[in-house]
Image: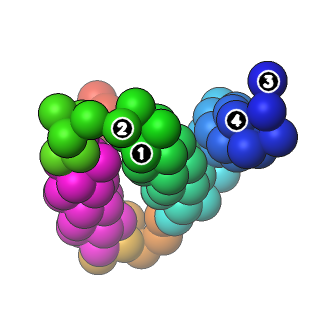
Amino acid sequence: MTPTHFSFTTAFILGLMGVAFHRTHLLSALLCLEGMMLSLFIALSIWSIQMGTMNFSPAPVMLLAFSACEASAGLALLVATARTHGTDRLQNLNLLQC
């Protein structure tokens, strides 16, 4: 495994561990998700450059578009949660009390 592959794999795994283990605030979970998407974008960009064909070149742009949609939906949920509950702590959220 090359050092670049190792660094992007490590960044993705650290983001995944951040989502899995540090679930106190919604903002920290969203930042970990964005870190995961950024590492996937860079890895997919490098992979499409290494392949050398033009067939895989739209894939990083599509991933970036989906990442932007995910970020906007996450921020909208963060604002809605902060307005209704007064905080973004995930312990205060209860799915049974909508």
Q: Within 10 Å of the Cα at label 4, are there few (<14), some (14-19), or many (20+) other Cα atoms? A: few
Disc 4 and disc 2: Cα gap in Å? 18 Å
Disc 3 and disc 1: Cα gap in Å? 17 Å
Q: Quadrant of the C terminus?
A: top left
64 left or right of 28 in image: left
23 left or right of 51 in image: right
Span colored in magenta: 59-80
Tell us which disc is closer to us: 1 or 4.
1
Give whichever of 91, 49 is nearer the camera.
Answer: 49
Residue at 55%, 48% in the rendered image: 39
Residue wearing tag 4: 5
- The amino acid on which the numbered mark 2 sits, given as a three-letter code, is Gly
Mark 3 or mark 1, earlier in chain: 3
Mark 1 or mark 4, earlier in chain: 4
Q: Main secondary structure of the magenta part?
A: helix
Disc 1 and disc 4: Cα gap in Å? 14 Å
Residue wearing tag 2: 52
- The amino acid on which the numbered mark 4 sits, given as a three-letter code, is His
Residue at 67%, 42% in the rendered image: 8
Mark 3 or mark 2, earlier in chain: 3
Instruction: Look at the numbered discs 3 and 1 and tell me whether their residues touch, using CB distance below 8 Å.
Output: no
- The amino acid on which the numbered mark 1 sits, given as a three-letter code, is Ile
Q: Quadrant of the N terminus?
A: top right
Disc 3 and disc 2: Cα gap in Å? 20 Å
Tell us which disc is closer to us: 2 or 1.
2
Q: How is the image coloured?
A: rainbow
